[in-house]
């Protein structure tokens, strides 16, 4: 897919996710409604400043805005894997702390000392 096609598809998706409507978003970007409509149709050529501004207003990266869907899916997968590893690490740490505390309590309460 071309960058224009990626932009059109991703822009539609992110506008929907962010609750952005055509006319108010065009005003927010300080561009004509017709220009934004062309970007959404894949027929317009926004300049880099406009692309940066769109990404910034929707709190996404430029890559997410103009990239292939697989790039986003790959990034999402990587983030999910990192999160899962982090959660597993915290879980293991918590188990270790609990075992250590229990062993200490058992040792302190041992009548055979």
Image (cartoon, grey):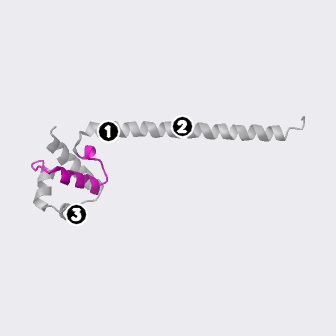
Name which of mark 1 and mark 2 comes first in the sequence. Answer: 1
The local secondary structure at tag 2 comes to helix
- Label tally: 3
- Judging depth in this view, the residue of 99 and 61 nearest the camera is 61
Quarter of the image holding residue 102? top right
Q: Which residues are magenta?
A: 41-65
Instruction: Say which residue appears at 14% left-offset and 44% top-offset.
Output: 4
- Locate the N terminus by quadrant: top left
For the residues labelled 1 and 2, the Cα–Cα distance comes to 22 Å
Residue 91 position, x and y percent, is 58, 39
Q: Residue furthest front?
A: 49
Return the residue at label 3.
28
Say which of marks 1 and 3 sits in front: 3
| Residue neighbourhood size for the residue with mark 1, other residues' Cα within 10 Å, grouped as few (<14), some (14–19), many (≥20) | few
The local secondary structure at tag 1 comes to helix
| Residue neighbourhood size for the residue with mark 2, other residues' Cα within 10 Å, grouped as few (<14), some (14–19), many (≥20) | few
Q: Which mark is residue 88?
A: 2
């Amino acid at each position: 897919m071309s960058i224009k096609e990626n932009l059109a598809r991703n822009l539609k998706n992110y506008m929907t996710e962010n609750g952005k409507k055509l006319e108010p978003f065009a005003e927010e970007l300080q561009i004509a409604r017709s220009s934004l409509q062309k970007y959404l149709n894949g027929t317009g050529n926004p300049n880099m400043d406009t692309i940066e501004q769109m990404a910034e207003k929707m709190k996404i990266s430029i890559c997410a805005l103009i990239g292939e869907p697989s790039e986003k899916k790959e990034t999402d997968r990587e983030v999910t894997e990192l999160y899962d590893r982090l959660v597993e690490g915290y879980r293991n740490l918590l188990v270790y702390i609990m075992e250590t505390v229990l062993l200490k309590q058992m040792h302190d309460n041992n009548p055979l000392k």
